Amino acid sequence: MYTWDTRVLYSQLGPDGRLSLTGLLDLFQDIATLHAEDFGSGLDTMTANGRAWLLSRWRVRLGELPRSAARVQVCTQAYESRRALNRRKFALLDERGAELAAADSLWTLVDIATGAPTPASQVVERYLEPGEGPDLGELPRKVQLPENAVPAAAFPITDDLLDTNHHVNNVRSVALAMRFLPEDLSFSALAVDYQRPLLPGQQVQPLVARTDRGFVVALTVDGQSCVCAEFIR
């Protein structure tokens, strides 16, 4: 298990003064990057070899998230690798070691030039620790957009949303979906499936559905779903 001791920063807070969902996901994304960097498979190395990781899935279980300046430990483990796919789990602990949040994720290694999946074993073997995935309770295997989904206001993809892969960053995609939730909605879990990248200049049509356990938001382009997120109470 790779760990990172840090503190909750003001820039990571939500309106309630606690670590926001996007702040949490940023921590998880950042520790995955640090882990790879420390084992010789960082961004520059991957780019030089024409490879990149694309996130396919988040499954996140939330507890009571920490307040400003709290000392926390972020943990991650790449625990399974098959062909181009890599599974990685995460946890956020308080300074006493109690778990505040946990997540599972699925990543695909792709060839930058072609976009095709490529074997990940030589990249992952440096830091792979085979093991079990996290216990997140009952979360959906696949996020389904209900038939009662209705369109919300469309918006364009602008350059400030992009990351080093030149598409909308994974966490920013969640933030875009959250724009269409009720302001008073609280939730205990998140499930996100990434089907296609959101690219600069695209016009996004959100579809929003209320369910018996929360909301589903799909970000679609030309009638195709790119990101589908379920926010579960």
Image: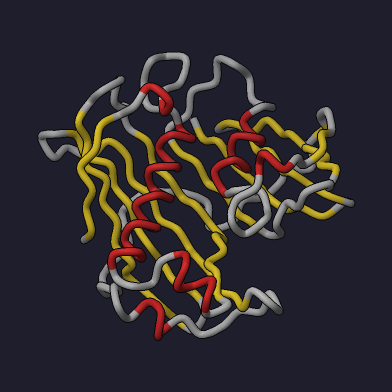
In this rendering, would 176 be left or right of 15?
Answer: right
Q: Point out residue 170 in the picture as x, y percentages from the top left corner.
A: 57, 49
Question: How many marks do you count on the picture?
Answer: 0
Q: Is residue 25 left or right of residue 115?
A: left
Q: Position of residue 41 (x, y in %)?
A: 39, 72
Instruction: Give the vertical position of 87 relative to 219 (above or below).
Output: below
Give me the residue at 23% from left, 48% from top. 4
Residue at 22 percent of width and 36 percent of height: 72
Looking at the image, which residue is at 49% across and 30% down?
Answer: 233
Q: Quadrant of the N terminus?
A: bottom left
Horizontal relation, residue 220 to residue 133: left or right: right
* Residue 50 screen position, x and y as percent: 58, 77
Q: Nearer the viewer, residue 51 or 211?
A: 51
Between 205 and 35, the one lying in front of the other is 35
Question: Residue 91 at what x, y percent from top left?
Answer: 29, 47
Look at the picture and state if 172 lies above or below 212. Answer: below
Residue for point 70% across, 57% down: 197
Location of residue 99 (image quadrant): top left
